[in-house]
Image: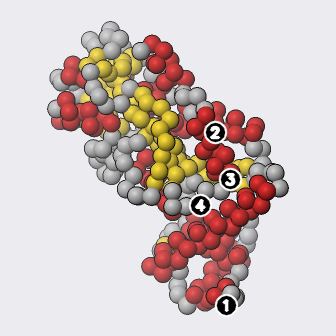
Amino acid sequence: MSALDGYRLEWLGSFLAVVDHGGFAAAAENVYRSQPSISSHVADLENRLGAVLFDRKERPVRLTEAGMAFLVHARAVQAELEAGEAEVQAVLGLLRGRVRLGCYPSAGAAFVPGLLREFGAQYPEVQVGLLEGAPSDIGAALQSGEADLAIRPLLPVPRETSISHDVLWGEPLVAVVARDHQLAGYSSMELARLSDERLITLGSGAQRETGTTEVDHALRDAGLVQQVVLRTNEPQTLVALARSGHGIGLTNLLAAAVSDTGGTRVIPLHGTVHRREVGVFWDGARAMQPAVRALLDLILQMPVPDAVQRFERRA
């Protein structure tokens, strides 16, 4: 017990608040403490550790090497306390707690609203926080504890070896074509038919996941990588570029389904083995508290998004 002497939980709370919100003032605003209190807690923690945790000359403040080393353990303490509280509530028959759910934009629009409505009806005392981002960032968020669960495509494959998943649904790749384009009359088409077209895909040359998505694999197999002239991180931008005649958009069905596709045709691609598979992910190395388990169980029971159901009925 001597290793715990002198530590106070509010020090950890203030330390993590500064990390999560990027500064002392922002931390104070978000956790409803005064800035002097936040600064005092962090200073007391630094004195106890004998190390400076933040480089205060940077804006926003940045963790020092010592701070980064300590962050992993502070997150672990936070997670274990939350898990302990949830276990006690489960014993008492009342599920409470907070679950952090990561997702990418199209699943966030097409799947998550119905999920949260159903979960809230079943577990009104559990809060769910959303973390939306690129699929390549989700594995790191799960491992760091920023997210407890994540809904994301199976590709790109997470680099973190402790990450596990279950598949939720599969969906085709689609071409988004302006209504006045010569290909707009097709109900489906092979990717090879686009060999003379300018192509627009999701992603960015600066992103780690570029070249590892389902569309990128399909383009490589068809020998069409050089046809890509534009990339964008936003499905709606991809549709707008295709509508304006900048090229033919290539994406997944759900990304097109949650966008305003007026003035375009969305045409499923056949003749390719590549399709997007989406799963729910978690870090198997971290203890799963009851509230997280409850959300995971519901995710696995939920129907697939409407756009995927409609495509499956037509196929």
The reply to whether discs 4 and 1 touch (Cβ–Cβ < 8 Å) is no
Residue indicated by mark 1: 2
Report whether 9 appears left or right of 182. right
- x 63%, y 80%: residue: 42
Q: Residue 298 carries which label?
A: 2
Q: Which amino acid type is marked by label 3?
A: Pro
Q: Which of marks 4 and 1 is nearer the N terminus?
A: 1
Residue indicated by mark 3: 290
Q: Residue 287 carries which label?
A: 4
SS for tag 2?
A: helix
Q: Which of 66 and 205 is in front in this view?
A: 66
Q: Which amino acid type is marked by label 2?
A: Leu
Residue 133 visible within the image: no
The reply to whether discs 2 and 1 touch (Cβ–Cβ < 8 Å) is no
- x 77%, y 61%: residue: 88
Instruction: Indicate the quadrant containing the C terminus: top left, top right, bottom left or bottom right.
Output: top left
The reply to whether discs 2 and 3 touch (Cβ–Cβ < 8 Å) is no
Q: State the image quarter where residue 172 is shown.
A: top left
- x 39%, y 33%: residue: 276
SS for tag 4?
A: loop
Q: Give the residue furthest to the front.
A: 91
Mark 2 Cα-neighbour bin, 10 Å: few <14, some 14–19, many ≥20: some
Give the distance between the C-alpha atoms of the residues marked 4 and 1, in whole angstroms.
26 Å
Give the distance between the C-alpha atoms of the residues marked 1 and 3, in whole angstroms.
31 Å
The spot of residue 272 in percent (x, y) is 27, 26
The spot of residue 148 in percent (x, y) is 57, 54
Give the distance between the C-alpha atoms of the residues marked 2 and 1, in whole angstroms.
43 Å
